[in-house]
Amino acid sequence: MLLAIGADENKLESKVAKRFGHAAYYIIYNTEDKSFEAMKNNDVDHTHAELSELLDQGVEVFIVGNIGPHAFDLLIDGGAEVYLARRMTVQEAIDKYNSGELDELTKSTIKQSFNHS
């Protein structure tokens, strides 16, 4: 299964980004072979095109520090699950997801989308 985690940097030791749609990178982690790749978030206009691309690549689970309503709805409508991970590294978030310790979100954590076109 593929996970995507918003991150401040392009490595597993990075902090989970405080706001998913504004993350500097998306870490795509494969739970089967424990490999990962980092994708730079180039979405300066906040169209969330990268999120659609991740869904198209088969990402099923998104791990966020916070998420606005537009990004949340896009992911849920795409069939994904969204989990909350605050104040931890990407690796810690992956470990907590694997052990069932992260809370699944049923709504966005932020009421309004900022800088959204």
Image (spheres, rainbow, N blue to C red):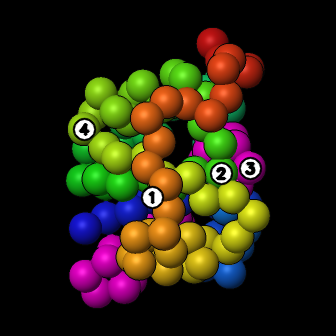
Within-10-Å neighbours for mark 2: few <14, some 14–19, many 20+: many
Query: What residue is rendered at 45% in x and 58% in y?
Result: 4
- Is 66 situated above or below 93? above
Residue that mark 3 sits on: 18
What number is the disc on residue 21? none
User: CB atoms at circles 4 and 3 under 8 Å apart?
Assistant: no
Residue that mark 2 sits on: 65
Residue that mark 1 sits on: 4
Query: Residue 100's spot in the image, x, y percent?
Result: 40, 70
Query: Residue 116's spot in the image, x, y percent?
Result: 65, 18
User: CB atoms at circles 2 and 1 under 8 Å apart?
Assistant: no
User: CB atoms at circles 3 and 2 under 8 Å apart?
Assistant: yes
User: CB atoms at circles 4 and 1 under 8 Å apart?
Assistant: no
Task: Kindly report the distance in space between the C-alpha atoms of the residues bearing marks 2 and 1.
Answer: 12 Å
Indicate which label's residue lies in the foreground, 2 or 1: 2
Q: Secondary structure at mark 2?
A: loop
Decide which of tag 4 and tag 2 comes sooner along the chain: 2
Asked if residue 40 is among those painted magenta in the image, a careful observer would answer yes
Using the rendered view, name the quadrant where residue 28 is placed. Answer: bottom left
Asked if residue 107 is among those painted magenta in the image, a careful observer would answer no
Within-10-Å neighbours for mark 1: few <14, some 14–19, many 20+: many
Decide which of tag 3 and tag 2 comes sooner along the chain: 3
Using the rendered view, name the quadrant where residue 56 is placed. Answer: top left
Residue that mark 4 sits on: 79
- Is 38 situated above or below 35? above
What residue range appears in magenta? 17-41
Q: Secondary structure at mark 4?
A: loop
